Image (cartoon, rainbow, N blue to C red):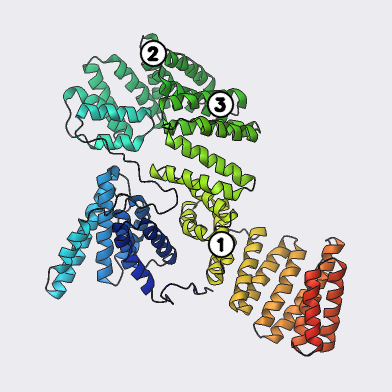
């Protein structure tokens, strides 16, 4: 069953969605007026209130438009998942609004360098680049507008759609969460020459910045003949497909024609790697091995080191790790001679990764990872520095040295230059947040979790783990309202990670419970219980969640339904040998039946509970005595309601004595009060 939310809104009942629509319409005006905090708070509220309301396309369009015009294009991207059903939506005006807003958003994403990202969603738009999706959305919006204009013999809808899709940002950025940062631009500076763009793409390639490299390549139209091989090679690397090998060979031919032996040999290294992973291992290994050897024999330390790097990749992929280590050692010597910290760090980090993967001694591995980290900090290469720190973390964990890991993180945070790589700073704060959570210091972890998420998200590097850590910190710190803001997106990201998503769903439901929103809490608990049951996990988690769902139903006055959930929990507990828990659930189910007003069902439930209680014989004496006292307390309630006053009084007296005897004075007082009411005829 599903219970309707009873959440109050500023305007009273929100049954028809009027309050959500009203607030959605205030989003852009608030942002345009500079009231960013109020706009962000309103956006979070309407997003929360709209959860599960896929049919409200008019409201979703207003949220899309807000994201598109306030620097939150990538947050709005998630709303594009609703495209799958908008074409069948009955309201033509809402279809127009949503298509126009989607066109505005995809247009902004394309303008800011993300036009080649693929849209992944089952349906007619799956696999389209955002650039092409933008065109489709414009066409769909105009088609809806023209149909409405034809109906009303006007051009107003087409004019409206055109204005919507041509709208300009109302502000640079509205932070929707604490510590949120504006997206770091990936587009190259304007007016660069083709050669400058190619050089820039090559630099981004070495720095492991693929989006920035693709943005440079997308900005290049025609190039002089002398640049054509370099451009062909870069496009083969960053736009991989069926013609990748052909493009790489075309680039090689160009380098040969130009008599650029170094570029030719580096190209052959990369081509060999591609062939290995394209199921042409023998040819690929031979190609890279020969090319790397020729580079090794030359005087260009930089090129020789890169040759060893690609050779190590190829060899390790074939399980020839000892040879890969030798290649990386040679490469590191040449990188040091070249004085290139980025290249040196790349070689050291790859070796650390291979040694971690092979289960080698963690301490030498750790030294490699730490030296790589230092090199990347010197080179200010954030993405690669994060990779090196991750290898250090793995090595510390393999060595069982978590305290040393914490010291390593703190040292880096305290010594990282002010203008050092922010991506690394964010990752270090993420690691510190995880450590703080592990020691129960949730409140201290919250700021780190927010900051690390903000930095990662501003670079498009936020992961499910970032969001999960934030939800965990907020929940542990008792900041339940904020849990409700971030948990739904986190749950979506955690698809495929069952343990994490179950835990996140539980925290989401628990936040609603703690805030007194029993109807929403029940809905979330029941969804989780259903997911667990369908996955075959009817153990401890399922039992706890079912009991929590039952408690919320009791609070909402649905006693019969609560009893059903308690009964399911009891059956599941009994199936795994949890007789004590099963008996506790049977006692609770009995009270729920009584609260529902069905006395006969309550008496039947009491008999079932008594059987369950007396079947428990494996617990400690004090635990069994508590269970018996609990059952007597329940029986006193039911028997009193049935008019069996003498029996009720006897059971209440026995329960009170037991609770006093086992040192539970609060429970004893509750039973004493019940006994008094029974004797006075007030039950």
Q: Would residue 501 appear left or right of 239 to someone viewing this image?
A: right
Would you place residue 311 above or below residue 134 in this image? above
Q: CA distance from mark 2 to mark 3?
A: 25 Å
Name which residue lies at 41% across and 28% down: 380
Name which residue lies at 24% across and 30% down: 197
- Can the viewer see residue 528 in this picture? no
Q: Residue furthest front?
A: 34
Q: Position of residue 295 (x, y in %)?
A: 37, 13
**Do callouts 1 and 3 mark residues in contact (Cβ within 8 Å)?**
no
On-image quarter of the N terminus: bottom right
Would you place residue 682 above or below residue 660 in this image? below
Label 1 SS: helix
* Camera-nearest residue between 374 and 253: 374
N-terminal of the two: label 2 or label 3?
2
Q: Which residue is mark 1?
A: 511
Give me the disc on residue 355.
Answer: 3
Q: Position of residue 487 (x, y in %)?
A: 50, 57
Name which residue lies at 47% across and 34% down: 386
N-terminal of the two: label 1 or label 2?
2
**Do callouts 2 and 3 mark residues in contact (Cβ within 8 Å)?**
no
N-terminal of the two: label 1 or label 3?
3
Q: Would residue 211 appear left or right of 662 to someone viewing this image?
A: left
Q: Which residue is mark 2?
A: 301
Label 3 SS: helix
Label 2 SS: helix
Would you place residue 181 above or below residue 522 in this image? above
- Can the viewer see residue 660 in this picture? yes
Q: Position of residue 312 (x, y in %)?
A: 46, 22
């Amino acid at each position: 069953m599903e219970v309707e939310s009873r959440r109050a809104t500023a305007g009273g009942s929100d049954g028809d969605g009027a309050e959500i629509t009203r607030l959605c319409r205030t989003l852009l005006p608030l942002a345009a007026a500079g009231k960013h905090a109020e706009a962000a708070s309103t956006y979070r509220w309407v997003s929360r209130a709209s959860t599960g309301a896929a049919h409200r396309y008019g409201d979703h369009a207003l949220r899309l438009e807000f994201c598109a015009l306030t620097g939150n294009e990538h947050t709005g991207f998630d709303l594009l998942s609703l495209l799958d059903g908008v074409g069948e939506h009955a309201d033509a005006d809402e279809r127009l609004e949503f298509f126009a807003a989607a066109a505005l958003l995809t247009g902004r994403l394309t303008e800011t360098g993300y036009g080649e990202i693929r849209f992944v969603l089952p349906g007619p738009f799956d696999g389209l680049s955002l650039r092409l999706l933008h065109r489709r959305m414009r066409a769909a919006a105009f088609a809806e507008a023209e149909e409405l204009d034809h109906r009303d013999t006007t051009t107003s809808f087409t004019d409206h759609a055109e204005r919507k899709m041509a709208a300009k940002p109302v502000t640079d950025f509205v932070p929707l969460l604490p510590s949120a940062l504006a997206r770091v631009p990936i587009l190259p500076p304007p007016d660069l020459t083709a050669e400058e763009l190619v050089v820039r793409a090559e630099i981004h390639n070495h720095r492991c910045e693929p989006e920035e490299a693709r943005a440079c390549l997308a900005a290049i139209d025609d190039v002089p003949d002398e640049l054509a091989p370099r451009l062909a090679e870069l496009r083969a690397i960053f736009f991989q497909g069926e013609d990748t090998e052909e493009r790489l060979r075309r680039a090689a031919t160009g380098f040969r024609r130009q008599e650029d032996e170094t570029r030719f040999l580096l190209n052959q290294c990369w081509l060999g790697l591609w062939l290995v992973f394209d199921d042409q291992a023998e040819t690929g290994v031979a190609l890279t091995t020969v090319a790397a050897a020729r580079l090794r024999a030359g005087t260009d330390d930089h090129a020789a080191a890169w040759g060893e790097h690609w050779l190590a990749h190829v060899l390790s992929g074939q399980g020839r790790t000892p040879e890969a280590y030798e290649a990386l050692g040679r490469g590191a010597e040449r990188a040091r001679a070249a004085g290139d910290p980025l290249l040196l760090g790349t070689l050291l980090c790859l070796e650390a990764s291979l040694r971690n993967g092979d289960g080698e001694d963690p301490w030498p591995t750790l030294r490699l990872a730490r030296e790589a980290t230092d090199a990347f900090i010197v080179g200010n290469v954030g993405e690669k520095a994060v990779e090196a720190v991750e290898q250090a973390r793995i090595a510390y964990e393999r060595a069982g040295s978590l305290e040393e890991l914490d010291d390593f993180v703190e040292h880096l945070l305290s010594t990282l230059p002010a203008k050092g790589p922010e991506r690394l700073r964010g990752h270090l704060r993420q690691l510190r947040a995880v450590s703080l959570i592990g020691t129960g210091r949730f409140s201290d972890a919250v700021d780190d979790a927010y900051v690390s998420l903000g930095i990662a998200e501003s670079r498009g590097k936020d992961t499910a783990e970032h969001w999960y850590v934030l939800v965990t910190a907020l929940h542990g710190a008792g900041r339940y309202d904020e849990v409700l803001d971030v948990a739904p997106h986190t749950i979506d990201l955690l698809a495929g990670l069952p343990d994490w998503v179950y835990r996140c769903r539980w925290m989401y439901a628990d936040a609603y419970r703690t805030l007194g929103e029993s109807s929403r809490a029940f809905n979330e608990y029941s969804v989780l219980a259903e997911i667990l049951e369908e996955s075959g996990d009817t153990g401890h988690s399922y039992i706890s969640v079912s009991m929590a769902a039952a408690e919320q139903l009791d609070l909402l006055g649905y006693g019969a339904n609560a009893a059903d959930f308690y009964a399911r929990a009891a059956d599941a507990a009994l199936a795994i040998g949890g007789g004590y828990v099963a008996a506790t659930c049977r006692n609770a189910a009995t009270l729920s039946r009584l609260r529902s007003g069905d006395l006969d069902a309550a008496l039947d439930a009491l008999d079932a509970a008594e059987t369950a209680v007396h079947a428990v014989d494996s617990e400690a004496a004090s635990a069994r005595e508590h269970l018996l006292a609990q059952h007597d307390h329940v029986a006193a309630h039911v028997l009193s309601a049935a008019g069996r006053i003498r029996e009720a009084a006897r059971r209440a007296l026995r329960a009170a004595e037991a609770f006093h005897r086992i040192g539970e004075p609060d429970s004893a007082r509750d039973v004493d009060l019940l006994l008094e009411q029974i004797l006075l005829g007030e039950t």
